[in-house]
């Protein structure tokens, strides 16, 4: 591969990771410099033992500890302490969907609650030399510490460019806040959390069994530890680390099984757009962990896995002809085949549930299984019915409408909509095809998009049969209710489909009382209990039939 295409792919990998992150309201602007390092408000609140709430309508954060209540407004130094006006040392900022401010600006009002300092990192872990080499600009040394497969994906200059590029996006990494080691069935993951001028950023190195850096993942630091929702009984299930597929792109996963009752029906969870971990973590939510633990608490096993674009981010991005088949379908089928060999699950009752893009790909997954027929039924969670470019444009229109109704500035989203419109025009131009791509394309890999231009999930689903449950949130701007209604209107020929929508539920499958725009995604939230109960009841009804 020539240097030009390779550099373009690297740009695509970074751009895709950013473009596929969720659109935010206009309040989510970049932070200016401050006198001290800023951090997520939720982190500071956790350390001082305060509760924290976000009001989307007023753009305010409220910290409460005992009789002390501090209310801060995004973009302002003015605040209220126990109802009285006070002035902060700096304004509250909203950076990449997180409320941010320096801990000192908050803790001075909670004088009995000092911030707990991060423990110093231990020395000598594998991967330290790789990080040190990149920080010092010695990319040649860093590349020598990479696996052969990873070296084929990134040259030394590209690796250094990648480091600098992400520093421009997230901020230059300065103080190392922490370092954690988390092995899975494929890699040993070492995550370095660095403070930047804007927000903490995590650099996760994926080491293979030989101790070589096999890939890496870069993104904002998480804001809060996970807690089970009330409908989960942690004593009712067990978890087993498993491996899906084999070879260079093997994926780590976890099989959650009811603790008793013999082989149980099992659901495979398939993620949406972008690089997602097994929990489908977004902001303050982990919807796939909620589903897995919630369903297992009701006697249903669940298999979830880290997506290929998450576990093998840059190796996968180096393939210029990657399609939704390689990104989503193949691994879902591998997961189903893996379950079909297990004696500790009910192999005659394997279900697949796809969220967002995972739902979009569900008809393709079912077609890929039509000869083996391992899949008993399928579940659509906020899945689009129309073409990908059509739903993307509708998403932008819906977001603009919602931002306007909340009194926000729609200008950034109108500009985004222009980009999507330009892409749609190129996709509809008959001179272009997967074999004849335009010289430039605004949405990352043109090949990926052109292989999907004529695919509409609902058209394929019309030709299929088998139990199908379609669920949608009525407060979802990313896959609006028009998509759900299209499913209902176009599948009238099928008698094996059930539908249900949920009034307050947003795209992350959790209830939100306000009008969803994505800003609320930073808040801790769980999949609504009624949806978990409905899925469990439906699976059990199909299993018994």
Image: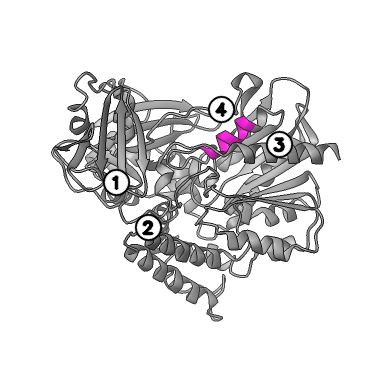
For label 1, count other residues whose C-alpha is less than 10 Å away and answer few (under 14), some (14-19) or many (20+).
Answer: many
Classify 423 as above or below 367: below
Q: Are marks 2 and 4 in contact (CB under 8 Å)?
A: no
Classify 353 as above or below 463: above
* Direction from residue 413 to residue 188 in the image, left or right: right
Q: Quadrant of residue 104?
A: top left
Q: Are marks 4 and 3 in contact (CB under 8 Å)?
A: no
On the image, the x and y values in percent for residue 442 come to 42, 67
| SS at badge 1 | strand
| SS at badge 3 | helix
| Cα distance in 3D space between marks 4 and 3 | 16 Å
Q: Which residues are magenta?
A: 286-294
| SS at badge 2 | loop
Query: Which of the numbered marks, if any, corresponds to residue 406?
Result: 2
Q: Nearer the viewer, mark 1 or mark 2?
A: 2
Query: Which of the numbered marks, if any, corresponds to residue 94?
Result: 1
**Near-viewer residue (301 or 482):** 482
Q: Which of the marked residues, 1 or 4, is nearer the chain's N terminus?
A: 1
On the image, the x and y values in percent for residue 300 come to 71, 31
> Residue furthest toward the right?
545
| SS at badge 4 | loop
Quadrant of the frame with the N terminus? bottom left
Residue, disc 4: 230
Q: Are marks 1 and 4 in contact (CB under 8 Å)?
A: no
Q: Which of the marked residues, 1 or 3, is nearer the chain's N terminus?
A: 1
Residue, disc 3: 536
Q: Nearer the viewer, mark 2 or mark 4?
A: 2
Q: Nearer the viewer, mark 2 or mark 3?
A: 2
């Amino acid at each position: 591969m020539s240097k030009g295409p390779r550099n373009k792919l690297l740009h695509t990998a970074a751009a895709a990771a950013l473009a596929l992150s969720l659109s935010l309201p206009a309040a989510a602007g970049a932070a200016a410099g401050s006198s001290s390092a800023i951090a997520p408000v939720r982190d500071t609140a956790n350390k001082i033992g305060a509760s924290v709430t976000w009001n989307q309508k007023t753009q305010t954060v409220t910290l409460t500890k005992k009789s002390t209540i501090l209310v801060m407004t995004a973009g302002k130094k003015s605040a209220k302490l126990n109802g009285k006006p006070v002035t902060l040392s700096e304004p509250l900022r909203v950076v990449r969907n997180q409320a941010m401010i320096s801990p000192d600006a908050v803790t001075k009002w909670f004088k009995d609650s000092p911030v707990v300092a991060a423990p110093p990192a231990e020395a000598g872990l594998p991967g330290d030399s790789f990080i040190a080499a990149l920080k010092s600009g010695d990319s040649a040394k860093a590349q020598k510490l990479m696996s052969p497969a990873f070296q084929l994906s990134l040259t030394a200059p590209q690796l250094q460019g990648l480091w600098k590029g992400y520093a421009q996006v997230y901020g230059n990494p300065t103080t190392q806040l922490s370092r954690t080691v988390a092995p899975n069935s494929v890699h040993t993951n070492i995550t370095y959390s660095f403070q930047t001028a804007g927000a903490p950023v995590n650099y996760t190195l994926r080491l293979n069994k030989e101790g070589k850096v096999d890939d890496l993942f870069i993104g904002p630091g998480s804001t809060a530890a996970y807690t089970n929702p009330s409908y989960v009984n942690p004593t009712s299930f067990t978890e087993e680390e498993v491996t899906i597929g084999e070879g260079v792109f093997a994926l780590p996963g976890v099989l959650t099984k009811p603790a008793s009752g013999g082989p149980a029906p099992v659901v495979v969870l398939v993620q949406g757009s972008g690089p997602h971990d097994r929990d489908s973590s977004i902001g303050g939510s982990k919807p796939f962990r909620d589903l897995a633990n919630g369903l297992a608490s009701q006697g249903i096993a669940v298999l979830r896995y880290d997506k290929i674009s998450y576990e093998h981010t840059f190796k996968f991005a180096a393939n210029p002809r990657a399609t939704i088949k390689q990104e989503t379908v193949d691994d879902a089928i591998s997961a189903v085949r893996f379950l079909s060999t297990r004696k500790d699950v009910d192999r005659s009752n394997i279900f697949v549930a796809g969220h967002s893009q995972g739902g979009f790909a569900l008809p393709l997954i079912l077609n890929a299984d039509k000869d083996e027929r391992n899949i008993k039924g399928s579940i659509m969670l906020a899945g689009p019915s129309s073409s990908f470019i059509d739903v993307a444009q509708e998403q932008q229109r819906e977001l603009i409408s919602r931002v306007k109704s909340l009194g926000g500035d729609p200008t950034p989203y109108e500009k985004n909509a222009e980009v999507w419109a330009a892409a749609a025009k190129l996709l509809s131009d008959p001179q272009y095809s997967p074999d004849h791509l335009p010289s430039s394309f605004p949405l990352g890999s043109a090949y990926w998009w052109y292989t999907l231009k004529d695919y509409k999930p609902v058209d394929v689903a019309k030709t299929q049969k088998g139990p199908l449950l379609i669920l949608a949130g009525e407060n979802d701007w990313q896959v609006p209710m028009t998509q759900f209604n299209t499913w209902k209107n176009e599948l009238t020929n099928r008698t094996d489909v059930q539908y249900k929508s949920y009034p307050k539920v947003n795209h992350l499958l959790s209830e939100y009382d306000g009008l969803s725009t994505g800003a609320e995604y930073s808040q801790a939230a769980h999949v609504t209990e009624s949806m978990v109960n409905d899925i469990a009841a439906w699976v059990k009804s199909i299993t018994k039939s």
